[in-house]
Image (cartoon, helix red, strand yellow):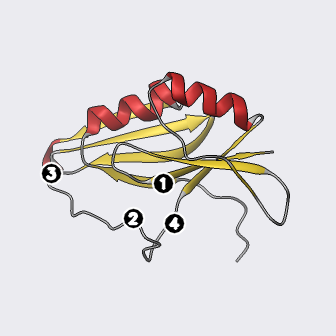
Amino acid sequence: MQISAVHHIAIICSDYERSKAFYTNILGLEIIREVYRAERNSYKLDLALNGQYIIELFSFPNPAPRPSYPEACGLRHLCFAVQNIAETITYLQAKGITPESFRIDEYTGKQFTFIQDPDGLPIEFYEG
């Protein structure tokens, strides 16, 4: 077996319209396809960054909550590479999102920060 890339990341949200707006209007991901699956009473939204498919956003009726903090088991966070962390923080603040104070990676010296999506899932922005 030879893995060549990450194909996509799946996220289940509690409020589809709010999460759709966050991932498209604030983070700027592009909609590839949006499907309503009547048999599941569920939406599936395929999103891309720079033309590359990366996220499946799902809605389901009454999804079970998933612990996110502190350091719960499971997928820890989603991380996006950015060119300039200060500009990213300014942009997020202008959109009404309060990022954590930026930190410095002790191994690479690169700066990064975290925000939360509408369901409190951690999203990292890493300069580099």
Q: Mark 1 or mark 3: which comes first in sequence?
A: 3
Vertical relation: 22 (above or below) 116: above
Q: Disc 1 versus disc 2: distance between alpha carbons? A: 8 Å
Q: Quick check: marks 3 and 2 in contact, CB under 8 Å?
A: no
Identity of the residue furthest to the right in this view: 108
Vertical relation: 125 (above or below) 89: below
Q: Which mark is residue 76?
A: 4
64 vs 56, left or right, is left
Q: Quick check: marks 1 and 2 in contact, CB under 8 Å?
A: yes
36 vs 122, left or right, is left
Q: Mark 1 or mark 4: which comes first in sequence?
A: 4
Vertical relation: 56 (above or below) 34: below
How many badges with numbers are in the image? 4
Q: Mark 1 or mark 2: which comes first in sequence?
A: 2
Mark 1 crowd level (few <14, some 14–19, many ≥20, 10 Å Cα): some
Q: Amino acid at mark 1?
A: Pro
Q: Which mark is residue 122?
A: 1
Q: Disc 1 versus disc 4: distance between alpha carbons? A: 7 Å
Q: Quick check: marks 4 and 2 in contact, CB under 8 Å?
A: no
Q: Disc 4 versus disc 2: distance between alpha carbons? A: 8 Å
Which residue lies under the disc numbered 2? 68
Q: Amino acid at mark 3?
A: Pro
Mark 3 crowd level (few <14, some 14–19, many ≥20, 10 Å Cα): few
Residue 8 in picture, x, y percent from top left:
54, 53
Residue 111 in picture, x, y percent from top left:
76, 49
Q: Amino acid at mark 2?
A: Ser
Which residue lies under the disc numbered 3? 61
Kindly identify the residue that appears in the image at 25 percent across and 48 percent down.
14
Kindly identify the residue that appears in the image at 76 percent across and 34 percent down.
84
42 or 97, which is in the foreground?
97
Q: Mark 3 or mark 2: which comes first in sequence?
A: 3
Q: Mark 3 or mark 4: which comes first in sequence?
A: 3
